[in-house]
Image: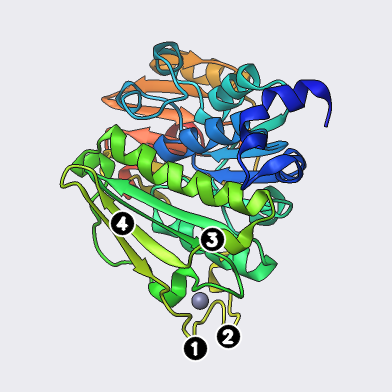
Amino acid sequence: MDTVARERYSRQILFPGIGEAGQEAILHSHAAIVGCGALGSFHAAALARAGVGRLTIIDRDYIELGNLHRQWLFEEADAAEALPKAVAAERRIRRMNSLISVRGVVADLTAANVGDLLGSADVILDGTDNFDARYLINDFAVSRDIPWIYGAAVGSYGLTMTVIPGRTACLRCVYPRPPQGAQPTCETAGVLNAIVSVVASLQVADALKLLSCHPEKIRARIATIDVWEGTLRQIDGPERDPDCPCCARREFSFLEERELPPVSLCGRNAVQIRGRERLLDLNELRARLEPLGEVRANEFAVRFTANGYEMTVFPDGRAIVKGTADLGVARSIYAQYVG
Ligand SMILES: [Zn+2]
């Protein structure tokens, strides 16, 4: 470690749990953050400041005004520009720590790209807001023996659980199937920024234990916190299920590629269209849409407003249609304007 790094991380090196050897390991590690909303933007900033040598930040969405009260990395100008979160996060992180390497990826994590995006990570942090992504991460992490750290927050309540394949229970040992029916979300039930930072901090602490080569310090437990009620609970050692389809039988059904139907984005009155695997020429699309409605564009996306709907189209063919939760309506708007 050079003298600049030694000074920069000195207070972390002084902490006996990490020390110089731990810091050295952190500097050579790779953390992947899936979802860069409230949890993910906290993970990204904390891990960058701690000196994690390589960060990959994956997010499919763009910044809106309603994100700013809890998503620490973003500013008013980002919302005004509707920048993709992964792009804004990468820029901001570069200004926080120029010694590390950071890559923002504007994409939806799928069975088709999970290997490329997460395959070289030493740890995966869950900053997502949905179970589709978490079951995909769980299957991938267990199949590749990569630790991952589950986290969720809504209202004033949150929980976290760290999965170390082969040692602790995995997500499917605890919840064999994704929950059915509508779940409370930040968009429908609201959320306090204070719960987000508690959950994200616990996730970051476990990530640093792993990356500084102290996995033995990780407790197998589910921690639940309610910052409004002032309650903290630790449920120790959920047992591994000896018949778990994922970590025992090693059937990784969420890794099988399947049709990617449109998905309604939890309570936002918006639908994501996954599009076909193709690259769109945004300049060409912009020129095509300009006579038909209001168009705003930057190098990352084209936003088109017409007839009460707002559609944001990304270069990989993906789009988010706002103004409807109806999958059919969204698909038809997409077909109508993008083709
Ligand atoms: Zn399991």
Mark 2 or mark 1: name the one nearer the start of the chain. 1
Spatial distance from mark 3 to mark 1, Cα to Cα? 24 Å
The answer to whether one can see residue 106 in this image is yes
Amino acid at dot 3: Ile
Q: Is residue 216 above or below residue 334?
A: below
Residue nearest the viewer, comparing 136 with 235: 235
Residue at 31% x, 56% y is 224
| First in sequence: mark 3 vs mark 2 | 3
User: What number is the disc on residue 243?
Assistant: 1
User: Looking at the image, do the residues carrying marks 4 and 3 touch, with CB atoms under 8 Å apart?
Assistant: no
**Which of the 4 image quarters holds residue 106?**
top right
Residue 274 appears in view: no
Who comes first in sequence, dot 3 or dot 1?
Answer: 3
Q: In the figure, is residue 310 to the left or right of 20?
A: left
Q: Which mark is residue 249?
A: 2
In whole angstroms, how far apart are the C-alphas of marks 4 and 3? 16 Å
Q: Nearer the viewer, mark 4 or mark 3?
A: 3
Report which quarter residue 160 is drawn in: bottom left
User: Residue beneath label 4, please?
Assistant: 224
Gap in angstroms between the C-alphas marked 3 and 2: 25 Å
Residue 248 on image: x %, y %: 57, 83
Q: Amino acid at mark 4?
A: Thr
Q: Position of residue 41 (x, y in %)?
A: 48, 33
Q: Nearer the N terminus, badge 4 or badge 1?
A: 4
Give whichever of discs 2 and 4 has the lower sequence position. Answer: 4
Q: Which residue is mark 3?
A: 218
Residue for point 66% across, 22% down: 97
Separation (CA) of disc 2 from disc 1: 6 Å
Which amino acid, by three-letter code, is at mark 1?
Asp
